[in-house]
Image: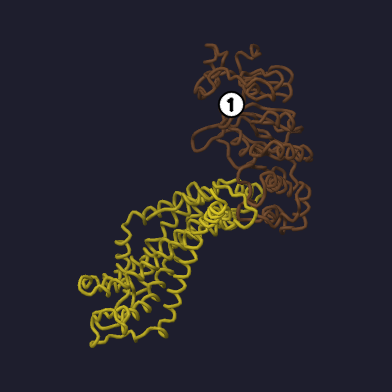
């Protein structure tokens, strides 16, 4: 079942678009958005949360666009889990969670803290008195307070050390909610998302089942992301192509970095079906090894 | 390095971060002294605040600690009474300016778009006038009095608070917790009151304390031009202006009221620093608890301070 759908959405700030003509469905089993910083992942997430109005295209919630949807129901159904500054530094933890509850139900605050594996007495603390992992659990507890059907997780573990990351991932994996996960951490996506979309320069360059996509990338950018992950005991990752080059303004945005670019890449490739539920936007998809 | 030296170094390191707090306590003590002395002026002043033709321009002595002025009034007595007027002007101007300026500023910063454009363009119009000239114009239109001074200065002071709080509020409005509140469906006025305003106040409070001395001096300028406090009302700025021609021959007439302004402005300044530390939960105020400070917030609030 599709909970949210972006239909040919272009997003930007002021008059400058940063996400171009993107279409994607948030379906059951978890959806991952992968890409480097500045690729438009968070911008897309903000649009799905109704915090950013598309310059063109529509975000669909059920059978209605967000403009026409019942916002009260939408707010109860879709909640964010941000990483950075997600808790008001002046508010006590209990008050931050109670903000999501009718009449600030304190008993429910304690239940929620227990649900995310925290001591209910932490409700009296302020964010700076908690560790990074505890803060992230509080953010998850607040999001769960309204009983959402979908969590939009924006880099939920990026600032945590690996052991804490593992615990937060266990918590997220055990939740009875759907999720859109935004991250540059491929291992996290592999664990939590059945489907993934790879974003580069505000465009989807590859989509498909996460396991297939990571096992055999069809786009050179996906392959570069996968190959950049350091392996324990292995040789350091070797970068290929001009990894610092800015996205090309015309044609394939990745062509200035691409190690297998050809003159044909000066024409922008369309996202086309690659079989097995996969889509790829690359003229040389068959040559990626 | 010996153990004793190491221990001494440790003590020094533990003590150094507390120095600003001690300064703030010192500043607060000074302000308390000035305020209490001003309130109790009728009871503790050594002389009545009246001219005495027999005591003209007496230098400081056991009888007149701060000397007497050109009409024979005891300068210490005038300073005690003058504190009432000067402090009232400072508090009233800053209260009016802050309430009006911060309200408009946080609304502009949070709302953005055309709301921000309208508020900030009106603010720019007020800022475009030379402040003293605008104060003078208002003071000329209204009757010369202390209340006129308050209104005239506040009319030129609020835009600074609007500009300051708008920039801070615009930054706060992009924080994750504000987005989270929006996603929970919390109404905009409640988000402003609950999240944006409290998190915007620290630089404003610091600025308020830094501005107190400036307000007192501006009030003095207006009084000098005959548009503010009028004789025989005691007011520090007025005393400085009236005594300035006597500075080379009778230094005490201008020096002591000047020192009163200096000490009060200094005290407000160090209180401002202390307030910044105390009100930012990520800085020293929470040191005793299990603090894990994130420097970004503190740096952000520090960097927003503006100098007029």
Question: Could you tell whether B214 is left or right of A157 in the image?
Answer: left
Instruction: Look at the picture and state if A60 lies above or below B70.
Output: above
Instruction: Look at the picture and state if A69 lies above or below B20.
Output: above
Image position, residue A191 (x, y; %): 74, 31
Image position, residue A236 (x, y; %): 63, 22
Q: Secondary structure at mark 1?
A: strand
- Name the residue located 70 percent from the left edge and 52 percent from the top edge: A97
| Image hue for chain A | brown
Q: Which residue is mark 1?
A: A200
Image position, residue B239 (x, y; %): 29, 74
Residue lying farthest front? B2
In what quadrant of the picture does the C terminus of chain B appear?
bottom left
Q: Nearer the viewer, residue A19 or A99?
A: A99
The yellow one among the chains is B
- Name the residue located 44 percent from the left edge and 79 percent from the top edge: B39
Q: Which quadrant of the figure has residue A24?
A: top right
Instruction: Look at the picture and state if A51 lies above or below A236.
Output: below
Q: Nearer the viewer, residue B68 or A24?
A: B68
């Amino acid at each position: 079942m599709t909970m949210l759908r972006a239909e040919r959405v272009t997003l930007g700030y002021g008059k400058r678009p940063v996400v171009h003509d993107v279409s994607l469905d948030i379906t059951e089993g978890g959806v991952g958005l992968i890409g480097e910083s500045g690729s438009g992942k968070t911008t897309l997430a903000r649009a799905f949360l109704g915090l950013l109005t598309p310059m063109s295209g529509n975000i669909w919630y059920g059978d209605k666009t967000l403009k026409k949807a019942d916002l009260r129901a939408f707010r109860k159904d879709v909640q964010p889990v941000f990483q950075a500054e997600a808790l008001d530094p002046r508010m006590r933890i209990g008050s931050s969670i109670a903000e999501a509850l009718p009449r600030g139900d304190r008993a429910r605050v304690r239940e929620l803290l227990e649900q995310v594996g925290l001591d209910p007495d932490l409700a009296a603390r302020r964010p700076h008195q908690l560790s990074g992992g505890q803060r992230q659990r509080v953010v998850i507890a607040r999001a769960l307070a309204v009983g959402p059907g979908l969590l939009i997780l924006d880099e939920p573990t990026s600032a945590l050390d690996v052991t804490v990351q593992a615990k937060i991932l266990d918590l997220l994996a055990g939740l009875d909610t759907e999720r859109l996960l935004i991250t540059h951490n491929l291992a996290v996506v592999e664990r939590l998302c059945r489907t993934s979309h790879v974003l580069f320069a505000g465009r989807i360059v590859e989509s498909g089942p996460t396991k297939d996509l990571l096992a055999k990338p069809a786009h050179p950018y996906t392959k570069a992301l996968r190959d950049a992950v350091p392996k324990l005991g292995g040789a350091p990752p070797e970068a290929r192509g001009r990894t610092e080059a800015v996205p090309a303004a015309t044609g394939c945005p990745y062509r200035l970095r691409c190690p297998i670019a050809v003159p044909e890449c000066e024409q922008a490739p369309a996202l086309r079906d690659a079989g097995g539920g996969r889509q790829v936007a690359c003229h040389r998809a068959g040559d990626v090894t | 390095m010996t153990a004793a030296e190491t221990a001494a170094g440790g003590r020094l390191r533990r003590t150094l971060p507390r120095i600003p707090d001690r300064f703030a306590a010192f500043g607060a003590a000074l302000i308390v002294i000035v305020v209490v002395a001003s309130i109790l002026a009728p009871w503790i002043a050594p002389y009545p605040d009246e001219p005495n033709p027999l005591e003209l321009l007496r230098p400081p002595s056991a009888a007149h600690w701060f000397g007497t002025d050109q009409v024979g009034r005891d300068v210490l007595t005038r300073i005690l009474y003058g504190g009432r007027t000067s402090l009232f002007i400072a508090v009233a101007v800053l209260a009016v300016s802050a309430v009006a300026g911060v309200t408009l500023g946080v609304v502009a910063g949070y709302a953005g778009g055309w709301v921000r454009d309208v508020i900030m363009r009106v603010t720019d119009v007020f800022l475009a006038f030379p402040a003293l000239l605008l104060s003078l114009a208002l003071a000329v239109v209204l009757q010369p009095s202390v209340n006129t001074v308050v209104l005239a200065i506040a009319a030129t002071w609020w835009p600074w608070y609007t500009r300051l709080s708008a920039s801070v509020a615009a930054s706060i409005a992009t924080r994750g917790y504000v987005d989270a509140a929006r996603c929970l469906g919390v109404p905009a006025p409640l988000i402003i009151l609950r999240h944006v305003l409290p998190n915007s106040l620290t630089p404003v409070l610091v600025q308020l304390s830094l501005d107190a001395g400036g307000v007192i001096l501006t009030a003095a300028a207006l009084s000098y031009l005959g548009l503010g406090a009028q004789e025989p009302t005691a007011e520090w700025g007025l005393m400085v202006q009236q005594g300035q021609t006597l500075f080379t021959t009778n230094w005490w007439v201008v020096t002591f009221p000047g020192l009163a302004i200096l000490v009060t402005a200094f005290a407000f300044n160090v209180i401002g620093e202390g307030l910044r530390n105390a009100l930012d939960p990520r800085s020293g105020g929470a040191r005793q608890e299990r603090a894990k400070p994130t420097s970004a917030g503190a740096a952000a609030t520090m960097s927003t301070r503006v100098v007029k």
